Image (tube, rainbow, N blue to C red):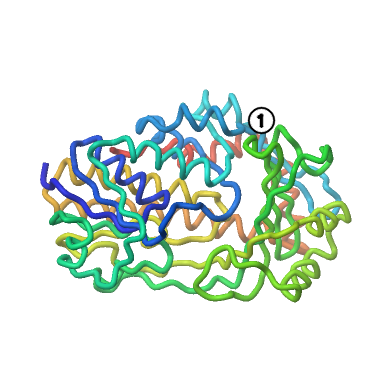
Amino acid sequence: MSIQNVAIVGAGVAGLTAALSLARLGIHCDILEQAPQLTEVGAGLQLSPNASRILGDLGVLDDLERKWCEPDTLRLADGRSLKAITALPAGRFARERWGAPYGVLHRATLQQGLLHAVLHNRNCRLHLGSRLTSTDPASIEALTGVKADLFVGADGVWSTLRERVPNSPGVTFSGNVAWRFTLKDTGRTDILDPSNLTAYLGRDSHMVCYPLKEIDGFNIVAITAGASPGETWAAQGSAAQRAVIMERFSGWNRKITALLLEAGEPTFWPLYQASAGSWQNGRDTVLIGDAAHAMMPFAAQGAAMAIEDGFELAGAVSRQPLPQALSSFETGRKRRAAKVKDRADFNRMAYHASGPMRVARDLVLSLRSPKALISDLDWLYGYRAKG
């Protein structure tokens, strides 16, 4: 083993997964988190088989499965007519084809599952309320009491640890925002299907709905163009911002616009993207998750990529001396992240199509069999990360 001690900055999905992955190899991890307590913002998320397989290896999946839902199908539908465009099997099919489940759950459920495992792992120590005033190794050691061999930047889109990596990625606002909220089950199965995930598609916008067992209700995410409130998550939308959202969905089916009006306190997420850049400094620092490759959520792979990163980083440092491990990790993960980003960009174009492009999209999807569409996802959901 080339390293013994790791300092991880950030206790989100990427940081906690990296800690568990390294700890199971006997590596001691100190996780630094600036928040005084972990309270996951947002609402729901999707965990595809490429991620849930890793959580199984880390001993976290069993608990999550008792709390989440596994959609029978992943449906695409028209946001104006509500007519189905196509549907892909999930549920039992996902387990049989990709060897792991496809689940939907509240973000807090995943965070708490990872956190519970970290707190009960003798090789992990969590330091809450630990804000970095400097990324100098001595400053980090002062917080942990341990000299680290490796520093892991898992501190998100606005990463502080990026400054330790020359030519690291920058981030820019995508021009899109996400409105996230949850609703209790109201029995409107024509829109909110308790057995399936549905993405409603429209001009320059789309809305995703899926059940959340934890609240006996549904997660709703509406994505469209908008202005950024700055470096913040979970901003409360102003009346003016809500009016803009409603205007962008004004041509949609009235049942959907009524649903959007019901959102009591939706959170307003600006969507940022990372540019190309270096993820590691060749010596002792590496970036993972959104700190390295923040991307648009159109492939629903944000959490999955963070989980893959943490797991594969541990595998790399267990097999090679640290400089070579960081280089090989970066090369392999950049290739994977670029392919996922390309898929997200393609989905963005398809989901938000209008006019002749929308007609062509619907025709192509109606003519292709679910089997053919599923085969296009084998590279994504069937991926087996190397831990």
Q: Quadrant of residue 104?
A: top right
Which residue: 55% across, 34% down?
Answer: 102
Left/right placement of residue 177 relative to residue 55 reads right
The foreground one among 20 and 366 is 20
Q: Residue at x 70, y 36 (%)?
A: 216
Location of residue 171 in the rendering, given as x and y in whole percent from the top left corner = 44, 72
- Residue 92 point in image, percent of width and height: 59, 24
Q: Determine which quarter of the picture holds residue 26.
A: top left
Q: Amino acid at mark 1?
A: Asp
Residue 334 vertical placement versus 372 (above, below): below
Judge left or right: residue 250 versus residue 16. right
The answer, for residue 182, to whether it is visible in the render is: yes
- Which image quadrant: the N terminus? top left
The quadrant in which residue 271 appears is: bottom right
Q: Give how far across and how far down residue 275 sits, in percent.
A: 41, 70
Which residue is at the front of the view, 382 or 143? 143
Q: Which residue is mark 1?
A: 72
Q: How many marks?
A: 1
The residue at 78%/72% (across/down) is 243
Q: Left or right: 138 with respect to 224?
A: left
Check the picture and name the quadrant holding the C terminus.
top left
- Can I make out residue 323 in this image? no
Q: 154 or 115, which lies in front?
A: 115
Residue at (41, 35) in percent of width and height: 55
Q: Secondary structure at mark 1?
A: loop
Mark 1 surroundings within 10 Å by alpha-carbon count, few (fewer than 14), some (14 through 19), many (20 or more): some
